[in-house]
Image (spheres, helix red, strand yellow):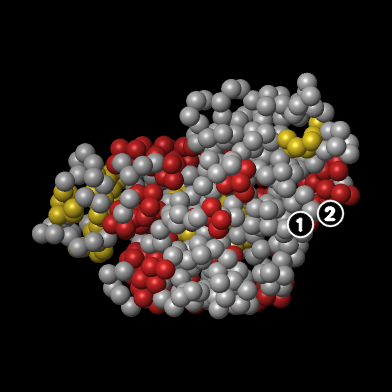
Amino acid sequence: MPWPSGSPVAEWWDEAVFYEVYVRSFADASGDGVGDLPGIRAHLPYIAELGVDALWLTPFYPSPGADHGYDVADYCDVDPAFGTLDDFDGLVADAHELGLRVIVDVVPNHTSIEHPWFREHRERYVWAEGRNGGPPNNWLAVFGGPAWTHDPASGEWYLHLFAPEQPDLDWHQADVQHEFESILRFWIERGVDGFRIDVAHGLFKDPELRDEDEPVPGSEPGSFDRRRAIDQPQLHPLYRHWRTLAGDRVLVGEVFLSDPVRVADYVRPDELQLAFNFTLLWEPWDAAALRDAIDATLGALAAVGATPTWVLENHDVPRLVTRYGSASRARAAALLLLALPGTAFLYAGQELGLEEVALPDEARQDPVFFRTGGARAGRDGCRIPIPWSPDEPGFGFTDAMPWLPVPADWGSLSVATQRDDPASMLSLYRDALRLRPRGGGLTWHESPPGTLVFERGGTVCAVNVDASALAVPQGELLLASDSANRGELPSGTAAWVRA
């Protein structure tokens, strides 16, 4: 299927590569074991040299840390653990000087329970009377357990789709909408180039708080089968308004829905410019499944004239090397990701081939682990600090002990170790970002079972997912994920060829 048919690149984000920095885990300049804004600022040349176009910062606002920054206590300041507003301003200025755009996370679905609003403006949150001695309805929290907590003082229950320390705001209240207009303007005036909107599909709730249908067996608790707690029609006029407010800045929605047709509703021409596409994150290393996910995404977004996005890693999912079972497959997946049309998102450490880390229980910090009584490992394993050098115990990330333990063997994956090795994962990403095809639609070529072969912008991307071998297409070999043997790609490898 060609996509899009000859449509021009209209905006900088249409073919951009965003680099997600999990602030706590990137670089620690203060020496306390936790990453911070000055640490990121010091490493901006590394990000620019990598060849990405934009930087996405996870929350750095004042927060008690129940969900590591996604429980915000003040939307218009910097947590002292991460620096100051002056540090932020300096980071943005330096990034712009290097040609990097900067987008920041905004977390509008919920606040911290320690936000002053929760004490002083109770009406800004979702409250309800209990039912038959229990919660108001059957809604489940994404982090496990009921989505409601009882407040003995009032006798009512408050809603939290995540942790109890993250009460949900009532977006039907005009006051809430006005407050967030001010928050967006605050950061726009500080020079940001856009916003990544956390839980963008979840702000408005069914006003009647009706029960959800029974979940489909085997589905993630409280996620895709919800219709009452997420994906409400009031979201769309809100985002049309935000689009006007943002001007020429990009709005990226975390729209956590499994159906790309439903996701496409959020990126119609006058709403969000981009929505995270989670489909590849949910697919196994299987050629047919990956192709179906690509085609479904392209078809749904082409119908509304929107730009597709592609993600293989982020701060909420296991690392790619572990998920796909080998570094070789992760290298091939990098060439697949960066050849697809549209916008790509990388997660810091993905370019190093970092693995998911199985932490001991006593080292875990993610509320998912504790809310599920250990039944779900949580997300700490993909948030281990970046190894900049092979020097233990801080690995160049910090002069102290890192906030999460870095595996002893990660010295071999450090930036310093990989930087000058032409066969390293880091070199592969740098080469791929430099040679990445741009412009033109995607056209599938004949793809034998177990393979994916397509052309875009004069470059043929050939991925041998799990076939015994795949012939390298005719043309000039631009890049191979691993060495091609006598013109063949072994299983779990990929190549780009100039047609």
Kindly indicate whether the residue at mark 2 contacts the one at mark 1 (C-beta within 8 angstroms): yes
| Vertical side of 237 occupied by 403: above or below | below
For badge 2, the amino acid type reads: Pro
Q: Under tag 2, what secondary structure?
A: helix
How many numbered discs, if any?
A: 2
8 vs 90, nearest the viewer: 90
Residue under the image location 50 percent in, 62 percent down: 384
- Residue 173's image quarter? top right
> Is residue 72 among the parts visible in the rendering?
yes
Q: 10 Å neighbourhood of mark 1: few (<14), some, or many (≥20)?
A: many
- Residue 423's image quarter? bottom left
- Residue 211's image quarter? top right
Residue topped by disc 2 = 116
Rendering coords of residue 499 (x, y %): 22, 57
Rendering coords of residue 415 (x, y %): 41, 73
Residue topped by disc 1 = 73
Rendering coords of residue 198 (x, y %): 63, 49
